[in-house]
Amino acid sequence: MPRLNRKYGYIFTCLLFTNVSSNAVKWCLDNSISSQVTTPVSSQDLAAALISALESNTVSPVSAPNDIVFDILLAEDNLVNQKLAVKILEKYGHSVEIAENGSLAVDAFKARVQLNRPFNIILVNIVLV
């Protein structure tokens, strides 16, 4: 079942794997994961995965005004991937905060919860977890 949200329409999920087996692909499909990519990832592959997730054909997003800005936490240790993801997400008008590792991502998440301003989306390179 697609992950729907009344305010934003739908929530996409993009997973990064070190290797993908047929079981992992099936698990992604069964759990409404919008896209997946293996690491190390080229900038073209990461862009394609993010665009695929943002423009997912698996759900029909609810029409939303173009002025909605998501606060996004990006947990990624690779500088090239950071720059590419930020450029793509900011192109769509979103605000992005970067955490270079899992520990910093958890700290950023906790800090935002303390301020009562949690992130709308958290993108995590699962190798960091």
Image: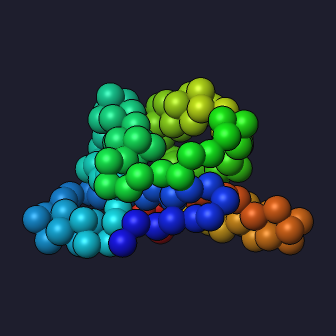
Q: Is residue 75 visible?
A: no
Q: Position of residue 9 (x, y in %)?
A: 56, 56
Is 61 left, or right, of 98 in this rendering? left
Of residues 123 and 82, the one drawn nearer to the viewer in this rendering: 123
In the rendered view, would you say 95 is above or below 104? above
- Point 80% across, 70% down: residue: 113
Q: Residue furthest front?
A: 63
Can residue 76 be seen from the camera position used here?
yes
Seen at 51% across and 36% down, the residue is: 85
| Identity of the residue drawn at 20% across and 58% down | 19
Image quarter of the N terminus: bottom left
Residue 55, located in which quarter of the rendered image?
A: top left
Task: Between residue 7 and residue 86, name the one nearer to us.
Answer: 7
- For residue 7, side relative to residue 75 (left or right): right
Q: Is residue 116 left or right of residue 110?
A: right
Above or below, 122 against 129 in this view is above
Residue sitting at 17 percent across and 68 percent down? 26
Give the image location of residue 108, x and y in percent.
Answer: 73, 61
Q: Nearer the viewer, residue 16 or 35?
A: 35
Residue 80: give x, y in percent of width and height.
Answer: 47, 31
